[in-house]
Structure formats: structure tokens, C-alpha cells
Image: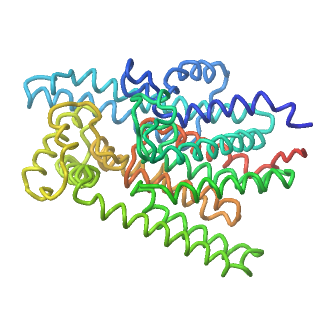
Amino acid sequence: MEIKKQVFPILFFLMILFFATYQDFPLVNNFGEIARSPIVFVAPFMLVYILSHKKIVISKYLSYWISYILYLFVLSIACLYLVKMINGSIYVFYENLAIKTLKMLVYPIVGIIFYQFIYVLLKQFKNPVYVVFHALLLLQLFTICWLVLEIYYLKKPIEFLSFIHAKPEKYWRVRLWTMEESWTGTILILLTFFPVYFLYKLKLFRWKKALSIFASVVIFISYVAVSESKGFLVLVLVCVLPLIFQFINKHKYLRNISFIFAGVILALFAVVVINLRDVIFDQFNNSITFGTRFTSIYAAIDVFLHSFIGVGYSGFVYFYPQSIETAMNSGMFDAFNLQEIKAYLSTTKALSTKSELFDNLIYGGVIYLYFFYKFFIQRYNELSKIAKQELYFLRIPLLFIILAGIVYITYNIKYEVWLFLAFLDFTKEYYYKEDAKPSE
């Protein structure tokens, strides 16, 4: 049987998937923030694997990313001299800006290595679509077991497997194997929709199809019901549920019973709205999240307006805290809890706008906006133009990832994002060939 021949590739890719989604590795306490994912420790081996191939083929989208990082590197060096001229020193908050810049460069470099590794690895598999699906299915089943236990222990004083986290203390929300709940959204959306794509591409036993669909539904509904992540809930409302309904309306078999699905979607919509309303009402004035987000966005736009070309990594560390201080002194955000954002005025640790878009708006300015369009928006537009039903299950997670990067997360160690995007690069070539559809 085909699956016997693919056991090792499936288990190997499952390991890669888990490493990509494990985002609170305890070694962060020894090696710093970059070590919050185990991917950084296997990246050198991935690089060796990439270089072992005589011919290295880089996708169009990855070339955009590499070009953008090279631009940031040059800009960071230029801004390093600018900061020294203004500040009289390259030390900010007792940290050397040159060293800090190199540390910040590690994130995209490891991301690029991982991206290319996945792209090359998929090309080496005999039946890549088959391997990826089964690895995803196993991770789905593992995630369901984890969710059940984590939800069970949610309101109990007992910690659930706290030793796998960098800080082994009680956490009162669902976070899987990440640092905080907001980081789980992209993982769970991928585990919900990504596997369904493969049901169209493979000849599978009915029980496997049913099991994967069941796992997707359980993961999505159970997390929506307990989630307190405001960003996740908002994106479920504005992009996930509308695209699901659009898929149903265009599906020739589901269209006739769309009123049933419409009722289910409306029920989910109501659950999300109620959940989101309760979270916002309870936390709007007290939660540090709103104060941090609003102040960060204001500060990011302020830096951008003063330097349209960006300020690089070195300029980010110097100018961003100054803009935060200006924002706080303006009085506009006095009604919010600014405890977290105040810490950015005295340390470079965890310095961020908590948004991929706004971080890079400071780093790269209008050049990033061009990169953002070419790398993300153009990719989504290309998928949207292909009239194939199964591509909804690539479009939904892709749109969620894009919007999440705008609203509430950065991609620094979100390696599941780079894995998914590398798969899209691969499938763009693979899609126009006759897919391998092994029988089981």
C-alpha cells in the first residue's frame, strides 16, 4: 500500500509541522527571543540540505522577500550612522544598535531558509500532496486531544503541561504550545481549512475524508467557542465566515441546501459576536492590549510620516520609542492601560508594534508597502482568479494570515505562515501538472 512507502516522509513532515507551530520553546530563557521556536536550531541543517543541491531554484515570491531584506540591511547600516550623528552614540537603552540590528536580521534570515527548505523538500517527495495531507491529519488529531485537555483545565488552578512553556505558570486561555492565545489563530485556521484542500486532490478512503472534515469542524468550533483573542474573533467575522458562505453558494451540490448552512453560519456569527462583545466590554479600558495597539499604531504612522523610505532595524530601535513617548504625552491615550507600552521607553526587549504591517512600515516605509503588495496581495489575487472550488481552502487561510499580520501579530517566529506560503509557491507549479493521486 502507498502509505507504507510514505511512513518516513509523513512522520518527518509531521515533525517539521510541529516544530513550525511550537512557539514557546523553553530554550528562549537561555538564547533569547529567537529561540522561542526550535526552528532556529535546525535551520543550519536546513541550509546545508538546500546547498547540497547542485541547482538552487528560488521562487518568484521568495526573490521579492530576499530583495526586501537586502534593502533593509543597507538601510539599517545607513541609519546606524544617522543615529550616531543625532545621538552621539550607537548605544540605545544600554544596547549596541549594531548588535541589535544583527539580532533582528536573524528572524528573516531563518524565515527565508525555512521557506526555501520547505519549497525544496516538497519537490523531493514522491507524492508531496499525499505526504502533506497525512502529516496535517495527524497534527489535527493531536490538536483535538490537546484542545480537549487544555479546555478542561482552563478554569482549574492546575497547570496543563506547563513545563513545555518558557514560563511554567498558569495561563487562563487556550494557547496550545505557543506563548499566548493571539499566536494560536493562524495555526488553528490552517489546521481547519488547509487539509480540506487535499480532499479534492487525492483519492482517499471515505473514512479519511470524513475524519479530516470532522477534525476541521471540531477544531474550529471548539476554539471559536472559548477564544478570548479579539483579533482572531474579528477576522473570523470579516473574512472566514463570509468566504465559507461564498464557497457554499458557488458549490453546485451545497447550493440547494445553502439555507441550512446559512443557519449554521449565522449561529456561528452570533457566537463570535457575543464572545467578542463580552471580551471587548470587559477589557476595553483595563486590558493592556488596547492601549498597546492604539499607541503603537500612532507611533508607527508618526515614524513613517517622518521617513517614507523607512528607518531600518537600527532606526526602529531609536525612533520608535521616541514616537511612543510623543503619543503618550499627547494625552490621546490616557483612558487606556499603558503599562506594557511604557516598558518600551526603557528597554529594547520585545520592542514591537505587535503588527507585521506596522513594524515593517517603520522598517521599510513605502518599499515595504510595495513588497507587501507583490508578496501577499498579488498572491491572493492570483488564487482568486482561478475558478476552482478547492482553492477556497487556500484562500481562506491566506486571507486570514494577511489580515492577522495587519491587525494583531508579527510573523517573526510564525513559521507555519512561511510553510504555508512555500506550499503555495510549490503548488502554483504543481497545480498545472497532473496531480499524483495514489490509491489507498
Q: As drawn, is 300 to the left or to the right of 401?
A: left
Please tell me which residue is depicted at 54% across the width and 37% down the height of the picture.
21
Locate residue 235, reporting x and y percent.
46, 61
On-image quarter of the C terminus: top right
Whether 236 is drawn above or below 61: the answer is: below
Residue 380 lies in quadrant: bottom right
Camera-side residue: 205 or 220? 220
Camera-side residue: 210 or 295? 210
Please tell me which residue is depicted at 29% across the width and 58% down the height of the picture.
283
Q: As drawn, is 190 to the left or to the right of 27?
A: right
Q: Identify the image's colour scheme: rainbow, by chain, secondary structure or one colour.
A: rainbow
Residue 221 lies in quadrant: bottom right
Please tell me which residue is depicted at 58% across the width and 35% down the height of the picture.
58
Locate residue 46, reporting x and y percent.
59, 23
Outermost residue, right direction? 1
Locate residue 153, reporting x and y percent.
50, 43
Camera-side residue: 224 or 381? 224
Locate residue 25, reporting x and y percent.
47, 27
Q: As drawn, is 1 to the left or to the right of 429?
A: right
On-image quarter of the N terminus: top right
Marker count (numbered): 0
Camera-side residue: 232 or 379? 232
Outermost residue, front direction? 157
Q: Is residue 238 visible?
A: no
Q: Is residue 232 visible?
A: yes
